[in-house]
Amino acid sequence: MDSQVKSCRAGFYDLPVLTLLFGNDVHPGGVPLTRKLAGSALVGRDDRVLDVACGRGESARVLAEQFGCRIVGIDYSEESIRRANELTEDVGLTNLVQFIQGDAERLPFANESFDVVTCECSLSIFPDPLLAITEMKRVLRPGGRLGVSDVVLNQPLPETLKDLLGHVLCISGALSIDGYRDVFSKTGFSAIRTRDVSEVLGDMISRMERRIGVIEDFLDREQFELANSLSASFSSISAARDFVMSGGAGYALITGKKPIAN
Ligand SMILES: C[S@@+](CC[C@H](N)C(=O)[O-])C[C@H]1O[C@@H](n2cnc3c(N)ncnc32)[C@H](O)[C@@H]1O
């Protein structure tokens, strides 16, 4: 797909308003879910870990601190990588954590360079998830593990969520749970396991609603236009809540293992 489209999709998460809404980790479940994903993918101290679409690198820092493992994060957005490096320097973790700008669909690493690959809330926004998973498998060593967390679509998406908000919440490109299983098995992963953690989606929407309220309350009259555009951009948030609450979308951890002999 055209690199301009990819830049646009990635650059979107650098918008200041999204930083205000999400903070540094742009996925439902925050740090606790990152730890769960790492547990499911059996991350250990001696592992070389790759976090694909790492954003500002919060998860990479959390895992390096928890396990003492070496982690590389890759993201399409140069701005996210710049911030990720800055934040990592601030906390003195540059000996373990490194960030590189690059495309999930063309990973700039040699075959079999990592023990674990993670990808949080991002597979659903790549133009070609099958290609991205094929790349993740290529860079994993035999016996290496892949851990993905993402939105699961259980029902057809309502028109109201086919807009900006659907994209921000990673709903519009999400797959069904069988769709994720399919992508994992088509690319040759074994021991595929899924774990339903849908409760984190409702929590994230509530957090966004609260933050929108706080931001609007703090804006003065001169900033009225910004307040208006904020409300307009996210006017369909209640549609997202209804869709999630009615079981239309959920959230899952999906893990798989690269077979030793292929
Ligand atoms: C929803 S955010 C998730 C960020 C991070 N994984 C987290 O959980 O905080 C999606 C991320 O995917 C990145 N992204 C989008 N398209 C990409 C691509 N083709 N290759 C690498 N990163 C991409 C965006 O820049 C953004 O940082």
Image (cartoon, grey):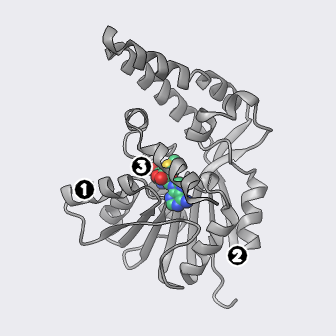
* Whether residue 43 is situated above or below residue 249 in the rendered picture: below
Residue 211 image-quadrant placement:
top left
Figure quadrant of the C terminus: bottom right
Circle 3 crowding by C-alpha within 10 Å: few under 14, some 14–19, many from 20: some
Distance between mark 1 and mark 3 Cα atoms: 19 Å
Query: The residue tagged with tag 1: helix, strand or loop?
Result: helix
Q: Farthest top residue?
A: 221
Amino acid type, mark 1: Glu
In this rendering, the label closer to the viewer, 1 or 3:
1
Would you name the residue on which mark 1 appears?
A: 86
Q: Between disc 2 and disc 3, whose residue precedes?
A: 3
Query: The residue tagged with tag 2: helix, strand or loop?
Result: strand
Would you name the residue on which mark 2 appears?
A: 190
Residue nearest the viewer, comparing 170 with 241: 170
Residue nearest the viewer, comparing 197 with 244: 244
- Residue 31, numbered label: 3
Number of numbered discs present?
3
At x 52% / y 33%, what residue is drawn?
A: 203
Figure quadrant of the N terminus: bottom right
Distance between mark 2 and mark 1 Cα atoms: 37 Å
Amino acid type, mark 2: Ser
Residue 107 is at least partly visible in this image: yes
Residue 111 placed where, x, y %? 54, 85
